[in-house]
Image: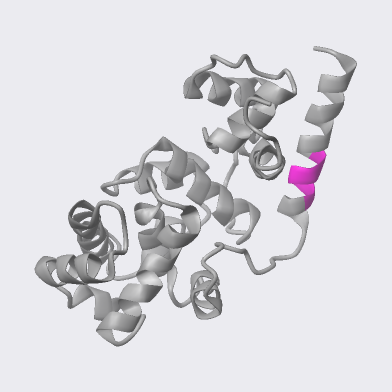
Amino acid sequence: MTEDQNKIIEFLIKEGGHRLSRPRQQYSFETGISEAERLLNNLEHFPHLFVCACVMDRQIKAGRAWAIPYLIGKEIGGFEFHKFAEIKLPQFKEIFNRLKLHRFNEKMAGYFYSAVQDIHIKYIDDASQIWADKPKSALIIRRFLEFGGIGIKIANMATNILARDFKIPMLDFSSIDIAPDVQVKKFFVEKGLLRKEASNEELIYRAREIYPEYPGILDIVAWEMGRQIKQDR
């Protein structure tokens, strides 16, 4: 490890720690819709919007995905969980297809319906039970992985947002991995912390090697800086 690389790692840990310790602020989901942002940040009353948005966050721009629960809520006349629980799968499919909410409307409508049913049955209509009672970070991640459509990247991203930005109490942060995002990987490669041909798994284990107490703490700043790097320059 070179001196410059050590300085980069120190910066990532320091800035990540600062964001973890600072008071809660409104998180930007980049939807471009002020009311959607307000509701997604209202984790106390609308936690299901956050969870359902996580389910939608795949193969489209993140801001578009995070707006989907809000747009559906507008269609069905409210954002309370019971409004969503009353909707059957065919109606969700009709809304997705008519509004063209996603690249894969039929499939994602099924995932959305399944997520609502999981919240209804497993968490008794309260999605915040996923992270209630100061659980281990591994438990929260596993619970997210139980939702259809959510993989390792989104499960870790969601848990990281809960810990870092929403200040949800957790017993530990050690299971929160860095999200294997293209921007994060680009930054790690640019700074010589990862080989260009590295797999997502290699990125995850590199972050664990660097900061095993909370690998995901390296995530947000690397992602932000990765977006500023031109690919293959």
* Residue occupying the point 13% across, 66% down: 89
Q: Where is residue 65, by image quadrant? A: bottom left
Q: Is residue 177 visible?
A: no
- Residue 25 position, x and y percent, is 69, 67
Q: Residue furthest left?
A: 90
The quadrant of the image that shows the C terminus is top right
- Rendering colour mode: one colour
Instruction: Examine the rendered structure and indicate whether residue 83 appears above or below residue 136.
Output: below
102 is within the stretch colored magenta: no
Q: Is residue 38 visible?
A: yes
Instruction: Examine the rendered structure and indicate whether residue 103 appears above or below residue 177.
Output: below
The range drawn in magenta is 14-18
Instruction: Examine the rendered structure and indicate whether residue 178 appears above or below residue 189.
Output: below
User: Which one is nearer the viewer's eye here, 173 or 233?
Assistant: 233
Left of 39 or right of it: where is 90? left
- Residue 79 position, x and y percent, is 36, 80
- Residue 56 position, x and y percent, is 35, 55
Left of 51 or right of it: where is 6? right
* Residue occupying the point 14% across, 72% down: 91
* Residue occupying the point 78% across, 28% down: 9
